[in-house]
């Protein structure tokens, strides 16, 4: 199964920028690239920080942008989001019985669990007792099926101090919720604004760049966040019974793609003029 992950779109009302960049234009370019090249994907997931300020207008613009996406999509919330204006614009968004924007999907390759780590008004995340109970129950229900987790905040340090102070609070409770025989194959993260991968407690994870601005590879600064304008990207993820592949595609790079015979082609394999 193939899907696309997009993260940290930080949408603003049209005409407003974030750190000197136009998040709407960048998302529109991302969607155009997905439509052009990723028609074989099953869906697209947006792993939080959908808007920059959690404003109703931002979600309205986001909905307009997503109307052009040709893949089914699922939305998650991050620390820049607010549930009430988000749900006002996306009333069909999936959520649990307590109103948290988290849900599960059964697929041929396993169970996908999308978690709500938002603690409104704070940059750090939180996974409270009610959310932990929901997660524990879903893991029990999954039985021996493979599990793939999606969450905005990492529950561990990634080695960039300015981000590590904004990770998931209460990670011990979250870790306890994961205890047991569940076959957790991978964690897909937002929040990091960088391509980072590794493993945590034996579970592989991956994070990817934002569609707008990035966090610099600064391993010393604690505050403020060291922003930069490195190239945005989305992830193309292939899941199979015995492997997980995560490809980053820097969709604003317009470098030539050439075959071994020197012929210029598009990423999809078509000849260019």
Image: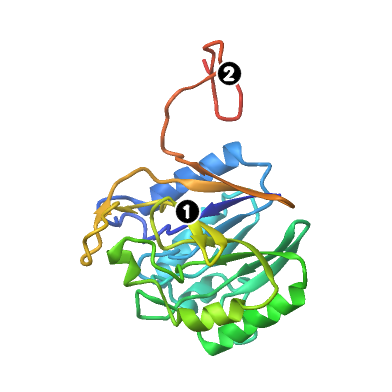
Q: Residues within 10 Å of mark 2 (few under 14, many from 20)?
A: few
* Residue closest to the eye, 106 or 74: 106
On screen, 98 above or below 46? below
Mark 1 and mark 2 lie on one chain; the one further toward the N terminus is 1
- Residue at (33%, 50%) from the top-left corner? 22
Residue at the outermost front position? 202
Horizontal side of residue 220 vs 158, given as left or right: left
Measure the C-alpha gap from mark 1 to mark 2. Answer: 34 Å
Q: Inspect this view and state whether residue 53 appears.
A: yes
Residue 144 image position (x, y, % from top left): 77, 68
Q: Inspect this view and state whether residue 207 appears.
A: no
Residue tagged 1: 197
Quadrant in the rendering for residue 37? top right
On screen, 18 above or below 266? below
* Residue closest to the eye, 28 or 267: 267
- Residue at (35%, 80%) from the top-left corner? 121
Horizontal side of residue 272 vs 94, given as left or right: left
Q: Are marks 1 and 2 in contact (CB under 8 Å)?
A: no
Mark 1 vs mark 2, foreground winner is: 1
* Residue closest to the eye, 134 or 50: 134
Residue 34 image position (x, y, % from top left): 56, 43
Q: Residues within 10 Å of mark 1 (few under 14, many from 20)?
A: some
Residue 252 marker? none
Q: Element under label 2?
A: loop
Residue 142 image position (x, y, % from top left): 75, 72
Horizontal side of residue 92 vs 201, given as left or right: right
Quadrant in the rendering for residue 183? bottom right
Residue 271 marker? 2
Q: Element under label 1?
A: strand
């Amino acid at each position: 199964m193939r899907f696309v992950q997009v993260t940290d779109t930080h949408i603003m009302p049209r005409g407003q920028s974030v750190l000197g960049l136009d998040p709407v234009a960048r998302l529109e370019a991302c969607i155009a690239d997905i439509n052009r090249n990723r028609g074989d994907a099953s869906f697209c997931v947006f792993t939080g920080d959908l808007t920059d300020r959690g404003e109703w207008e931002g979600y309205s613009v986001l909905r307009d942008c997503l109307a052009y996406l040709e893949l089914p999509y699922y939305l998650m919330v991050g620390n820049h989001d607010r549930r009430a204006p988000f749900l006002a614009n996306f009333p069909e968004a999936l959520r649990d019985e307590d109103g948290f924007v988290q849900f599960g999907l059964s697929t041929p390759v396993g169970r996908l669990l999308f978690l709500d780590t938002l603690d409104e008004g704070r940059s750090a995340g939180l996974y409270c007792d009610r959310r932990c109970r929901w997660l524990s129950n879903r893991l029990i229900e999954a039985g021996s099926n493979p599990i793939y987790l999606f969450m905005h905040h990492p529950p561990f340090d990634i080695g960039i101090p300015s981000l590590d102070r904004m990770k998931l609070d209460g990670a011990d409770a979250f870790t306890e919720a994961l205890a047991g025989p569940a076959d957790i194959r991978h964690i897909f993260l937002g929040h990091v604004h960088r391509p980072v991968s590794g493993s945590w407690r034996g579970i592989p994870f991956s994070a990817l760049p934002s569609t707008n601005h990035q966090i610099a590879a600064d391993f010393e600064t604690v505050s403020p966040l060291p922003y930069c304008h490195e190239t945005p990207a989305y992830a193309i993820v292939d899941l199979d019974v015995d492997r997980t592949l995560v490809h980053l595609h820097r969709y604003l790079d317009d470098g030539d793609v050439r075959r071994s015979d020197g012929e210029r082609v598009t990423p999809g394999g078509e000849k260019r003029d």
